[in-house]
C-alpha cells in the first residue's frame, strides 16, 4: 500500500483552487438570482461540492446557515460574501 503525504502547501493550493472554482461558478451565474435562501442541495449544485465539503464549511464557520426544522438554508448573499472575503491575489505571492 502506497502512502502519499499531504503538505500544508498542498492544502493551501487546494484551498486556492477550490475558492477559484467557486468564484468561477458564481461569476458565471452573476445576475442569476432566483431566490434569497438556498437549500443544501442547491448550494452543493451551485458550488459543485460534496455534502461533506458543505458540512465542513458549516462546521468551521466559513459558511453561515439557518436551520428550520430539519432543513438547512443558506443565504445567497452569504455565499457571495465568503467568496469575496477569501479572494486570493496571486500577484502577492
Image (cartoon, rainbow, N blue to C red):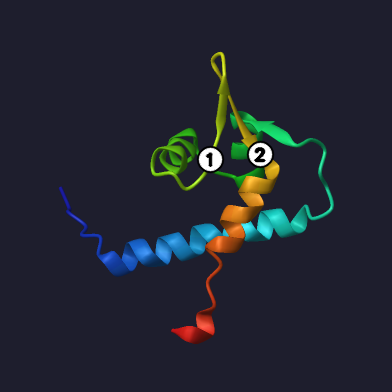
Residue under pointer 2: 75
- Up the image or down, 52 lies above or below 79; here it is above
**First reached walking from the N terminus: tag 2 or tag 1:** 1
Task: Check disc 1 and report the residue beneath it.
Answer: 64
Residue 32, percent from left and from top: 83, 47
Classify residue 23 by image quadrant.
Answer: bottom right
Q: Secondary structure at mark 1?
A: loop
The relative height of residue 73 versus residue 24 in the rendered view (above or below) is above
In the displayed structure, would residue 47 be above or below residue 39? below
* Residue under the point 52% across and 44% down: 63
What percent of the width, then of the height, locates residue 1?
15, 47
Q: Do the CB atoms of the residues marked 2 and 1 lie less than 8 Å apart? A: yes
Q: Is residue 61 left or right of residue 63?
A: left
For label 2, the SS is strand
Q: Nearer the viewer, residue 35 or 42?
A: 35
Q: Residues within 10 Å of mark 1 (few under 14, many from 20)?
A: some
Q: Nearer the viewer, residue 21 or 92?
A: 92
Amino acid at each position: 500500500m502506497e502512502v502519499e503525504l499531504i503538505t500544508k502547501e498542498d492544502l493551501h493550493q487546494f484551498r486556492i483552487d477550490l475558492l477559484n472554482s467557486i468564484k468561477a461558478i458564481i461569476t458565471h451565474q452573476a445576475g442569476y438570482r432566483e431566490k434569497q435562501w438556498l437549500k443544501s442541495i442547491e448550494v452543493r449544485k451551485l458550488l459543485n461540492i460534496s455534502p461533506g465539503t458543505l458540512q465542513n464549511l458549516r462546521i468551521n464557520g466559513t459558511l453561515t446557515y439557518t436551520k428550520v426544522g430539519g432543513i438547512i438554508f443558506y443565504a445567497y448573499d452569504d455565499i457571495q460574501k465568503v467568496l469575496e472575503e477569501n479572494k486570493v491575489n496571486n500577484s502577492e505571492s
